[in-house]
Image (tube, rainbow, N blue to C red):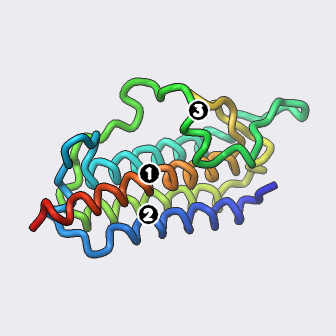
Amino acid sequence: MHTRQTALDTLERSTRAFLDLLDGVSDAQWRIRPAGQEWSMAETVEHVVLANRAVRGALGRLRASPLAADAERYDDAAIGGDMFRTAAPAPPGAADPTGCYATRADGVTALRASCDAIAASANEATIDLRANGVVHPVFGVFDGVQWILFAAAHTDNHVPQLRALRDATRDDAR
C-alpha cells in the first residue's frame, strides 16, 4: 500500500518522464496537430494540467469527506495505465484543452506548477489522506493517496501519445 510520500514520488517520476519528452521540441512542433491526431503536444499538455488541477481540487475537498472504516476501497494496484483502456468515457468537457499555452515553455511551466500544487496540497494536509475520499466521476471513490496515484497514472497514460506527437512533428516542423 502506498504512502503519501511514495505516491508523490510516483507522480514526480511520471511528470519527469512526460517533461523529458518535451526537451528539444520547438514552438512550431508544439502547436502542430498531425493528421489523424486528436490533439497537438500543446493540447495534450494542457489536458494533463487540467486533470492535475482537478486532482488538486479533489485533495482540497477531502477534509469534508471522511470514509467509513468499512468503506469499499479502490485497489491501489488497479491505478495505472490499464485503468484507462477499460474505463467508461470521461464526462463531456472534462479536461478538454482550449489551446491556452502558446509556447512549450508556457506549457512546461504550467505542468510543473500543477504537479507542485498537488504535492503542496498533500504535504500541507492535516488529515490522514487514507481516511478521506472523494468520488471520481468514472472510477468511484479514491482516497487522498489514490488521487495522487491517479494523477501519475493519467500522466503516464499520455506519455505514448506525447511520444507519437513528438515523433510525427519532427518531419512536419522542418
Disc 3: which residue = 86
Figure disc tally:
3
Dot 2 amino acid type: Phe
Q: Residue at x 67, y 54 (%)?
A: 125
- Evaluate if marks 1 and 3 touch, with contact meaning CB atoms under 8 Å apart: no
Occupied quadrant, residue 93: top left
Compare marks 1 and 2 and give the one earlier in the sequence: 2
Compare marks 1 and 3 and give the one earlier in the sequence: 3
Q: Residue at x 52, y 48 (%)?
A: 154
Q: Nearer the viewer, residue 88 or 150?
A: 88
- Evaluate if marks 1 and 2 touch, with contact meaning CB atoms under 8 Å apart: yes
Regarding mark 3 in the picture, which secondary structure is present there? loop
Dot 1 amino acid type: His
Badge nearest the viewer, 2 or 3:
3
- Residue furthest bottom in the image: 24
Q: Nearer the viewer, residue 63 or 97?
A: 97
Q: Residues within 10 Å of mark 1 (few under 14, many from 20)?
A: some
Badge nearest the viewer, 1 or 3:
3
Disc 2 from disc 3: Cα separation: 22 Å
* Residue 89 % position (x, y): 48, 27
Disc 2: which residue = 18
Compare marks 2 and 3 and give the one earlier in the sequence: 2
* Residue 53 % position (x, y): 46, 47
Dot 3 amino acid type: Thr
Q: Nearer the viewer, residue 118 or 77?
A: 77
Occupied quadrant, residue 109: bottom left
* Residue 121 % position (x, y): 58, 55
Identify the mark at residue 158; answer none if there is no mark. 1
